[in-house]
Image (tube, rainbow, N blue to C red):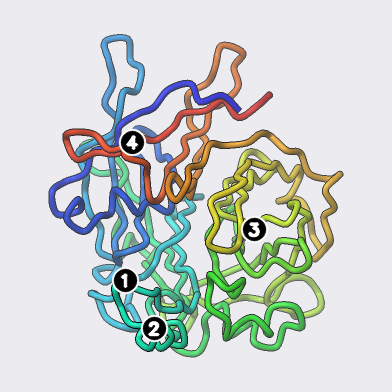
Amino acid sequence: MIVERRVELRFAQESREAETHTNLSAVRQDGRCLWVAGDETATIERLTATTDAEGHVTGYDGQRTVRLADLVPLPAGPEEEADIEGLARTDGWLWAIGSHSLKRKKIKAGQSDAKSRKRLATVVREDNRFIIARIPLVTGADGLPEVTAADGDRTAAVLGGRQDSLTDLLAGDPHIAPFLQIPSKDNGIDIEGIAAHGERLYVGFRGPVLRGWAVVVEIHPETDPDDPRRLRLRPIGDDGERYRTHFLDLGGLGVRDLCPHGDDLLILTGPSMDLDGPVRVVRWPGAVTVDAAGIVPAEDLQVVGPLPYGDGDDHAEGIAVLDETDHDGRPKLLVVYDSPAEDRLTSGGGVLADVVSFEK
């Protein structure tokens, strides 16, 4: 894959102080705009493209912040982070998903051995992480996309917080249930990707990776008829199950993001543990036409190419297919990074994302 150029994502002062720009975890294009999220807040940000005299996108600014708590009820209230790790957009809806993960406390520099050992033994659950939100999109007076709590009979709604989260559903799953009490960076549950296609929602797991096989769970959410602000999962197929598990041979890597491209899914892959790389983009051909849970061997996947990664920084976390194409008419891909390297940080408080050609 070729990094053709970098574009600056510029954020307002409040978001820079919250370090959203250095903790980007998800991105989706929506016309002239980008929807992005960081994993340290309970917000989604909208950025708008800036262009040069020839109409080429040079960056994104004009940030508008959307507080999830203004749209859907959050289990732990508006201030606790939701650890948003994925965004999806389809059919007039914006979707957001939390990591659904537990976290083990980090050792801090300068602490005694006793305190360090105690921190490593401490596992924390934050309830806002265990949500999936569906938000109506509308067109504002300026012609740009906006989110709203209600648009006619379409309402913002959430799954999770009432013992109905995706991980609650998976508590009896023979493959995933053993990992529910394991923190994310220990190869436990860690959701980092979401893609929407019609009624289908695909959820990508960074962890667990099962003997080298990554997990993608398919669900079909719908509005709860008893409460329009809640979602429920309807049965898939004739067996009455409310989810499907797909296991993909990604060479031992987990899913860092998912992005639809026609009937295919593009998969951003990376290590499940707290490691830097390798990182690459893989295509799952015809993914959205599959009507059964299955095993997807490596020969049924296409490696598009590698992405750069750093040493303790530059962790690729989100991908989005752009409307922009190369000279052969092939779409380009936008990549955003968590823990960006110093040379990605701009003097104006922005951060640089990569525009890449994602076909060989």
Give the distance between the C-alpha atoms of the residues marked 2 and 4, in whole angstroms.
35 Å
Q: Earlier in the sequence, mark 2 or mark 3?
A: 2
77, 215: nearer the viewer: 215
Q: Residue 94 falls in which quadrant of the image?
A: bottom left
Discs 1/4, front? 4
Say whether residue 119 is left or right of residue 350.
right
Q: Earlier in the sequence, mark 3 or mark 1?
A: 1
The amino acid pointed to by label 2 is: Asp
Give the distance between the C-alpha atoms of the residues marked 2 and 1, in whole angstroms.
29 Å
Q: Earlier in the sequence, mark 2 or mark 4?
A: 2
355, 240: nearer the viewer: 355
Discs 2/4, front? 2
Residue picked out by circle 3: 254
Give the distance between the C-alpha atoms of the residues marked 3 and 4, in whole angstroms.
25 Å
Q: Residues within 10 Å of mark 2 (few under 14, many from 20)?
A: few
Q: Secondary structure at mark 2?
A: helix
Can you say whether 259 is above or below 69 in the image? above
Quadrant containing the N terminus in the rendered view: top right
Can you say whether 175 is above or below 217 in the image? below
Give the distance between the C-alpha atoms of the residues marked 2 and 3, in whole angstroms.
32 Å
Q: Earlier in the sequence, mark 1 or mark 4?
A: 1
Q: Residue furthest left?
A: 13
Q: Residues within 10 Å of mark 4 (few under 14, many from 20)?
A: some
Residue picked out by circle 1: 81
Can you say whether 208 is above or below 299 in the image? below
Give the distance between the C-alpha atoms of the residues marked 1 and 4, in whole angstroms.
25 Å
Q: Residue 9: percent from the left, percent from the top?
A: 29, 37
Q: Residue 194 falls in which quadrant of the image?
A: bottom right
Q: Residue drawn 59% across and 61% down?
A: 201
Residue picked out by circle 2: 113
